[in-house]
Image: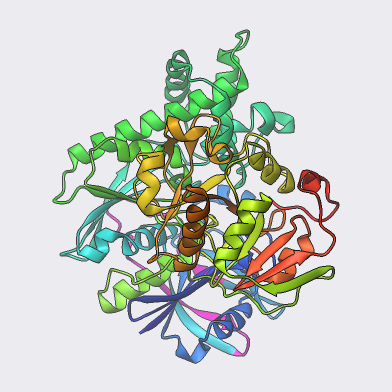
Amino acid sequence: MVTCGLKLTHDGAVAVVENGRLRFSVELEKINNNPRYSSLENTAEIAGILRQNGCDLRDIDHFVLDGWGGFDQDALAIQPRLEIGPDFNYLTAENEGKPYRLEISQYREKKLEDSILNGHASGPLLIGDHSFRYTSYLHVTGHVMGTYATSPFAARGESAYILVWDGGMYPRLYYFDVSARQIENLGPIFLLIGNIYSIFAQHFGPFKVAGGFAKDNLSVAGKVMAYIALGEVRKELFPIFDDVYIKHYQTPMGFANVFAKEVIKRIDGTSYSDEDILRSFHQYLEELLVHKLVKKIQRNPRPYRNICLAGGCALNIKWNRRIRDTGFFEGVYVPPFPNDSGSAIGMACVGQLMHTGVYALDWSVYAGPEIADSEPAGNWEARPCTLKELALLLQESEEPVVFLNGRAELGPRALGNRSILASPFSPGMKDILNQVKKREPYRPVSPICLEAHAPDIFNPGTPDPYMLFDHLVRPEWSARIPAVCHLDGTARLQTVNHNDNPVVAELIEAFYALTGVPLLCNTSANHLGCGFFPDVHSATAWNKVNYVWCSGTLYRRKEMIPVWQLANASQSQMV
């Protein structure tokens, strides 16, 4: 059976699952340097995406669409394509320029007793000259199934809790029961929707917006998580946060701005820095999350104490590590696409479960688009280059290299196949990478490290192939690899081995043989505000580094830019 999962709103994507195996998942932002978070509005594009990945419309047995939107008209203000209905919503799409409406499920279940596996069957889905029936499931169902189905627990036939905390919903707890192949709904653990983190931040520091009314901004949360390393936790603010929450909470939508403004009133006249306020609020939410989560599970014990973390808030590596460090759970899993970039995969997994009963997915994180065929931009020369030769270049030149290899990784993190790699020895390398990418100086650069050596360098240094947990750099290593040390002594570690990515593992092994250090700097290779580079032409046209490596070929800029001038090159930028 072949199922095609579709996410048509932000983080639009097309995913195909065949007989329990993920064939591919293509996010719109990773095609043609599209803007980040791109939506899929023209459904005619689906045919081309399928075709480019070796699939035909006639191969698809079932189309499954992601649900979206709330239960009332409040959602319309931020969703111009959406019309709210009593039992399902209407999403505007177009097919080759002709607008039409799709009936879709909503964001989450209305009542605790509602099964999130109840789908809404409808049609037509128009793709060029073709018309298809489809089923739509709640948005939260995609998060639950995409996360559980890709987990080691599903692979082992074990049940698990799934915590979903998304930008537009409370943190809600579910339990996938393997024996019944059903999802139990255990309800919310507290009543703050996920976007309170980014909206609160937009009242302080460099994130402050004019007019004092912030909107959900998908790019803010990650920056805040880095920025708080500049501050200190002020525990005396916690009772203020508690009191404002208790006295002023009314409805979830809009409360984040009310909360921030009331907190500002309470601390008026004090000398708290914005950095301290944001770090304290981060810590407040972290402690609230861990305490309420553990209490909820203690009240709802189940045979397995595995947990999967899903939704946009599961990109918060510090919260993820805190949950893992409790020791309360037998296993903690976060997929590489916990945000909406994994919603199409989740929909395909729901379809697989409902039609075949199969709940586990055979998959690889490197299932995005292949590198598109292209020629380099002008002023570049090419030569064959082995991985050993590239390792020597990284060591001797101390310059960053755009590294393009195979299929793109799924989700928002660059995991080696669409990366900029560099030597970690110079404290200035982090500054160079941040400058050429036009990122703030407090932003970290991640290490990509051979899995077997990670515990020697990081604490805990446990396997982390998707860069989704916080690790401490061991003191004896911090001076050796300053480029990957964050301001608070942590690192957003990615581990790699020959099974995960043999090409990247071989490169790092060659670098290790030369230097005695089994890791490199790793940051994403993409234009400013866009998805990963899809081809060599994009990477060379960016023209901000001197070297691009792709599939055994090294491209070198004919007129070399001195590395100290990289930040000032007058070409398009990246983020």
Residue 362 in magenta? no
Q: Looking at this rendering, what residue extends furthest in the front direction?
A: 514
Q: Position of residue 203 (x, y in %)?
A: 64, 28
Residue occupying image coordinates x 48% and y 55% = 513
Residue occupying image coordinates x 60% and y 62% = 390
Q: Position of residue 32 (x, y in %)?
A: 69, 70
Q: Give the prevailing secondary structure in the magenta stretch.
A: loop
- Image position of 101 (left or right of 64): right
Q: Position of residue 74 (x, y in %)?
A: 57, 47
Is residue 561 visible to us here?
Answer: yes
Label count reads 0
Which quarter of the picture shows residue 544?
A: bottom right
- 117 vs 362, nearest the viewer: 362
- Image position of 204 (left or right of 453): right
Residue 112 in magenta? yes
Residue occupying image coordinates x 70% and y 74% = 383
Q: Which segment did they paint magenta?
A: 102-129
